[in-house]
Image (cartoon, rainbow, N blue to C red):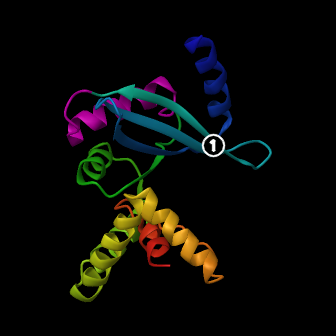
C-alpha cells in the first residue's frame, strides 16, 4: 500500500519545477518523538498543492546532524533532490535552522513563529506580565470550576450581557493571549 501510494505522489511531485517543504519535530501523547515533512508546489493548473509526505519516528536526539540525516533521507526518497534543492520553511529552533544550513538548503523562517516569539517576549514586560498574571488567575478560576462557570453564565444572562467564554492562552499561539484578554 505504501509503495503504490508513494509512486503516485512521486509522479505528481516530479511535474513541479520547484518544491517548498515544511518540517517539524513533535512529540506524541505517548511521549514518542516524530519528524514530519510536507511538500508544497504549484501544479499544472497553477494551484497550490500541499502534501504531507512522511511522518517518521525519530527516537534519537534532535541534534542538527540527526535532523539533517533524516531530512536528506526523506528528500531523497521522494526524489526532491533531483532538481534544485527544495526551499525549507521552519520554525526558529536552533537545531532545525542549523540542520537546514548544514545541508545548504534555501531557508525561510516561519513568520508566525517569529511573531509568536516577539509577542511572548512583550508579554513578559512587567506592565503586561502583571495584567496577564491576573487574567490567568481569573480564567483559571472559571476553567477549573463548572459551578463558577455556570454562575458566570447566569449573571451574564441576568444582566443581559452577551455570554462570554473564558479562554486560556497558550504559549505556542500568540493570538490566544489576545483572545484571553478580550
Residue 3 showing in the rendered view: yes
> The residue tagged with tag 1: helix, strand or loop?
loop
**Nearer to us in this view, 74 or 136:** 136
Query: Residue at coordinates 55% horizontally, 40% vertically from top-left?
Result: 39
Q: Look at the image and give the residue range highlighted in magenta.
A: 59-81
Residue 149 vs residue 137, the one in the foreground: 149
Residue 88 x %, y %: 44, 49
Expressed as whole percent of the image width and height from the top left, the position of residue 35 reads: 37, 35
Expressed as whole percent of the image width and height from the top left, the position of residue 122 reads 30, 80
Q: Residue at x 53, y 37 (%)?
A: 83
Residue 115: horizontal and vertical position, in percent?
A: 41, 71
Which residue is the extreme one toward the bottom?
A: 127
Q: Quadrant of residue 56?
A: top left
The residue lying toward the viewer, choosing from 5 and 142, is 142
Q: Which residue is mark 1?
A: 17
Q: In the rendered view, would you say 149 is above or below 72?
A: below
Q: Is residue 158 above or below residue 22?
A: below
Answer whether residue 65 is magenta in the image. yes
Looking at the image, residue 20 sits to the left or right of residue 61; the answer is right
Q: Quadrant of residue 91?
A: bottom left
Amino acid at each position: 500500500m505504501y509503495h503504490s501510494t508513494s509512486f503516485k505522489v512521486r509522479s505528481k511531485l516530479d511535474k513541479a519545477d520547484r518544491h517548498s517543504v515544511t518540517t517539524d519535530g513533535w512529540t506524541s501523547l505517548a511521549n514518542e518523538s516524530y519528524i514530519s515533512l510536507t511538500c508544497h508546489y504549484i501544479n499544472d493548473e497553477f494551484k497550490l498543492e500541499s502534501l504531507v509526505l512522511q511522518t517518521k519516528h525519530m527516537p534519537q536526539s534532535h541534534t542538527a546532524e540527526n535532523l539533517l540525516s533524516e531530512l536528506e533521507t526523506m528528500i531523497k526518497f521522494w526524489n526532491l533532490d533531483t532538481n534544485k534543492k527544495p526551499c525549507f520553511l521552519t520554525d526558529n529552533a536552533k537545531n532545525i535552522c542549523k540542520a537546514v544550513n548544514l545541508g545548504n538548503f534555501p531557508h525561510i523562517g516561519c513568520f508566525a513563529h517569529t511573531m509568536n516569539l516577539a509577542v511572548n517576549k512583550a508579554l513578559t514586560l512587567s506592565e503586561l506580565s502583571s495584567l496577564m498574571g491576573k487574567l490567568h488567575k481569573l480564567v483559571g478560576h472559571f476553567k477549573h470550576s463548572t459551578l463558577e462557570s455556570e454562575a458566570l453564565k447566569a449573571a451574564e444572562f441576568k444582566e443581559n450581557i452577551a455570554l462570554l467564554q473564558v479562554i486560556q492562552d497558550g504559549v505556542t499561539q500568540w493570538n490566544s493571549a489576545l483572545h484571553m484578554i478580550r
